[in-house]
Amino acid sequence: DQIIMVKNPVNPDVQLWIGALERLSQAGLKNLVAIHRGFTPFGESKYRNYPNWKTVIELRQLMPNLPIICDPSHISGKREYLFEISQKAFDLGLDGLMLESHIDPSCALSDKDQQVTPAELGKILDKLVIRYSSSNDPIFENMLDTLRSRIDGIDHEIIEILASRMEIVKQIANYKKQNKVTALQINRWTQLLEDRIATAHKLNLDETFIKIIFQLIHEDSVRQQTEIMDSDL
């Protein structure tokens, strides 16, 4: 009945994390808890370890009954970021926090920069807003259902639009094939991306978000064009 805590792997690979949890479960250990301590950062980061919340959300989707505890101390590496990481963890529905406290952090034998005094810890905990996965308020639930229905409809429209776009991509691929033109047209891609980002700015959409979306669309477009061009080889 002992609780076994399994921290995330160094790299943000949810399958590695799940693999460790499953091996323990297969060995008969059922009281498992995942500990989110952040991942090795790529490039500069204000945090000691990059939180990569996407991986934590994936783990929650794949193992919904597994408790997940966040370790803001090791993620941040600095006490000034403890509150924002702790609040983010609760905003995402994580089950608890692991925060380091020391009566005199300056005298701590290790990780002194990420530790707080008991009094400071109390202030952090008092500021946190605890959120819940659902509400008993029927008015809230009805409004939420209405808004979610609108999102569902828009999402289906997006998928249909993407399908139409890919049909045009296939037509372009066949036309390029007939004229012996390469699948990748770097000038066209650069112009397209600049145009879409400019449009995103006008609509107050995040540039990085739009860039990632269109990079994925372009990668699949090139893949499909290449497959069509090489189909007779």
Image (cartoon, helix red, strand yellow):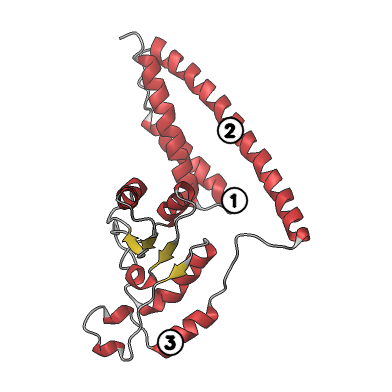
Is any part of residue 188 visible from this angle? Answer: no
Residue type at mark 2: give it: Ile
Q: Which mark is residue 159?
A: 2
In terms of depth relative to the viewer, which is nearer, 97 or 210? 97
C-alpha span from label 1 to label 2: 23 Å
For residue 195, above or below residue 138:
above
C-alpha span from label 3 to label 1: 42 Å
Determine contact: label 2, label 3, CB under 8 Å.
Answer: no
Question: Residue 63: horizontal and vertical position, in percent?
Answer: 45, 50
Looking at the image, is mark 1 or mark 2 nearer the viewer? 2
Looking at the image, is mark 3 or mark 1 nearer the viewer? 3
Residue type at mark 1: give it: Lys
Q: Which mark is residue 202?
A: 1
Of pointers 2 and 3, the one earlier in the residue sequence: 3
In terms of depth relative to the viewer, which is nearer, 156 or 73? 73
Determine contact: label 3, label 1, CB under 8 Å.
Answer: no
For residue 85, above or below residue 210:
below
Question: Circle 2 — which element?
Answer: helix
Report which residue position mark 3 lands on. 120
Looking at the image, is mark 2 or mark 3 nearer the viewer? 3
For residue 46, above or below residue 12:
below
Figure quadrant of the N terminus = bottom left
Residue type at mark 3: give it: Glu
Q: How many marks?
A: 3
